[in-house]
Amino acid sequence: MVTRKKPKETRDRFVDELDPILDGLHRTSIRLTGDAGRAEDVLQDAILKGYRFFSTFQEGTNFRAWMHRVLYTVFVNTTRDRGPRASALDSVPEPEDLTLPLAAELNRPTHVERSRAVMESVDERIKQAVGELPDELRTVFLLSTIEGLKYREIADVMGCPLGTVMSRLFRSRRMLQERLTDYAQDQGFDVEAASYGEGRPQGENS
Amino acid sequence: LKCQEYRRLLHPYLDSELEVTESLRVLEHLNVCGSCGRLFDAEERAWNRVRDVIRSEVAPAALRQEIPALLWREDRRAFWRRASTYLLPLGMAAAFLIYTMTPSPSGNPPGDPPTPEARPHAHGAAIDFTVAHFLNVQADAGSGGLITDRMLEKHAEFRRLDAKEARRVYRELLGPNAAVPPSLKCNRIQGAVSNTDFNGTPVPVLLLDLNEQEQYSLYVLNRTDADLSNLHLMPGDGVTEDLRIERCRSCYVIGVTKGEKVFILVTRPGASVDPMISLVRRTF
């Protein structure tokens, strides 16, 4: 016999499941949309949609992956409504203004303050570099490296083959590495470029 | 494997996507190959750093606090969505029934379709009483439901007749030789409606089942109590010298005059009176 759980009970269970992954969903939403206001709208829609379909979530499976799939679906649907976001890396101008605050911060008198300023600047550059990745690469990178989803789960979230996930992940990391290496070298850091090897993962032709 | 091939496994290894045996082989290699060991360490540290930076961002506290209320509002919306699916039609049906049950100032059931003629749609107090009674009973029975004793009793005084007495009244009404046709069951002669409009004369009520689905109420009036000329009925089918069948063009009432008796048949609002006329022609 099918029994309907009481709303309060379901609500509490959903909140319990959601609480530990809310930060991750918020981060992903911010990175997907590139806009804090819209990120919150997308996240709220995803939470409501997830709650509405919570009965279809199979206990024992990965709720984090399930909710990311909901979030990604909401994001894709709203993006389709609004028109595509510029996603090509080349179309994003190199941010010059970051170096200016950095230079200003470096003029601070104490060593501790200078170190913190450098680190904060690097942090900002990392965030910016991730944000500048093309949509598909950024999504795969976030879900894998940041949120710790398995490749198979990411393929499920994005509705694409496993090989495509691996390929996109490889490309996103290489792109990020190039960007951050360039930046580090510009800032005078001693950077040894890592070598991945020449091959690329199978699964995507482009 | 050569170093180059191990390095292809760098990301799957760091992402814990390798099989256990593959991971062990990579680990073994990293233990003996300083170059690969340094590369893997550097990669791990770099991506951990990126992860830490991005993960330092947390959801706004206000959003976290808002979630229970957000879900509660969603539950409330869902409740009203469900309610509108089920309750709205029920509410509309109830409103319609209340509307049709409420007598208009003219004494005419207000739920009737508009009359094609300009004259007011009324059949007179005696007929309207029978119609109102039937509508009340029908409302209790609901759409497609069968009328029960309890429903009839609820809206009028009743004197129950046993089966033998019922047959006697039936023959008295329809003639001494009248027999209940097999296809037309006289469900039961339930009793009589008391109404001062009939000068205190009990009005026999018959329930006629045309078939399993259609059920009509037949009210038998004395000619003196119900003048068909006052009924605004139009000549219908089956008019003969001793049997006049007249129908209301606007509603679900037909009048039948046979001798000194006037029969009023009422069917459900909106139903066609044609089967009822056929029934009358076969019966009388």
Image (cartoon, coloured by chain):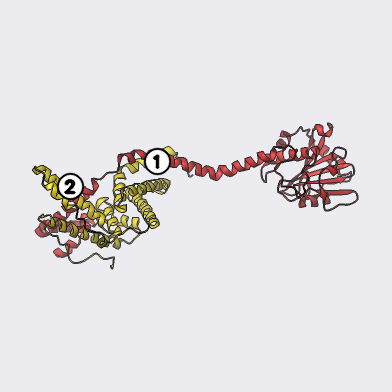
Chain colours: A yellow, B red
Nearer the observer: mark 1 or 2; the answer is 2
Residue nearest the viewer, comparing B284 with B133: B133
Instruction: Tell me the quadrant of the picture where the N terminus of chain B can be found.
Output: bottom left
Chain letter for mark 2: A
Relative to B235, A107 lies left or right: left
> How many other residues sit within 10 Å of disc 1, few (<14), some (14-19) or many (≥20)?
some
Badge 1: chain ID: B
* Rendered location of residue B283, percent (x, y): 83, 49
User: Within the image, what quadrant is residue B71 found in?
Assistant: top left
Three-letter amino acid code at the position of disc 1: Leu
Q: Is residue A89 visible?
A: yes
Q: Residue B30 appears at what percent x and percent y?
A: 13, 57
Q: Going by the image, does A122 lie left or right of A167? A: left
Q: Element type at marker 2?
A: helix
Which residue is at a point 32% across and 55% down the rendered structure image? Answer: A153
**Is A171 or A99 nearer to us in this picture?**
A99
Q: Which residue is at a point 39% across and 38% down the rendered structure image?
A: B69
User: Amino acid type of disc 2?
Assistant: Glu
The tag on residue B252 is: none
The residue where tag 2 is placed is: A120
Circle 2 residues within 10 Å: few <14, some 14–19, many ≥20: some
The image quarter containing residue B195 is top right
Residue A71 drawn at (x, y percent): 35, 51
Q: Which mark is residue B70?
A: 1
Q: Is residue B284 visible?
A: no
